[in-house]
Amino acid sequence: MPKGLNVTGTGVIVRDFLIMEGEATISDCLKEVRRICEEHEPPWHYPSAEHFRQYFWKLRKAGLVEETRREPFEQYVRRDKTVSTWPRSSNFHTEKIYYRTVKERRGDPAWSNVQKALYG
């Protein structure tokens, strides 16, 4: 995704999405970032799931987002949207975690460059 003057960055997309939705999972935020990037002409490059999780961790560390609730997985839904009746192969991810923006930090310049805000 391009960076620079008057260009929307990943953080701003996430902030606007969380404000609009109220709360969302990291996966929901990534889907929105990908949708925005694909709609841009020419399409912007969007982050991989792993890189986006790392980026979201930085948003948490900077105090821009906060956890609101956890919800246990009841069923495992495959990528093709079918529900698996087999038990999950991993117990590592057993719940969905929802996040929201920190109201006092919605106008913070760190949304445009969280890396610089954290590390200078």
Image: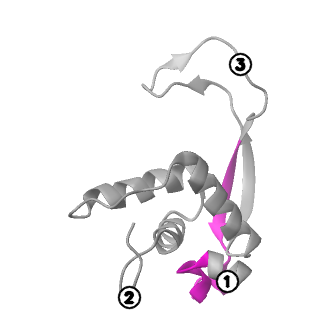
Seen as rendered, the residue at the extreme top is 86
Seen as rendered, the residue at the extreme left is 41
Q: Are marks 2 and 3 in contact (CB under 8 Å)?
A: no
User: Left or right: 50 with respect to 39?
Assistant: right
Describe the element under mark 3 as helix, strand or loop.
loop
Residue on which the image places disc 2: 5
Check disc 1: other Cα within 10 Å, few if <14, some if 14-19, many if 20+. some
Magenta region: which residues?
Answer: 96-114
Residue on which the image places disc 3: 89
Residue 106 placement (x, y as % from top left):
59, 83
Is residue 25 shown to the viewer in this render? no
Asked whether residue 112 is drawn in magenta, I would say yes
Quarter containing the C terminus:
bottom right
Residue 104 placement (x, y as % from top left):
68, 86
Q: Residue at x 53, y 20 (%)?
A: 83
Seen as rendered, the residue at the extreme right is 91
Q: Residue at x 34, y 60 (%)?
A: 37
Q: Are marks 1 and 2 in contact (CB under 8 Å)?
A: no
Question: Up-down: is 84 above or below 42?
Answer: above
Looking at the picture, which amino acid does disc 1 mark?
Answer: Ala
Quadrant for residue 57, please give it. Answer: bottom right
Of mark 2 and mark 3, the one earlier in the sequence is 2
Residue on which the image places disc 1: 117
Residue 96 placement (x, y as % from top left):
68, 43
Describe the element under mark 1 as helix, strand or loop.
helix
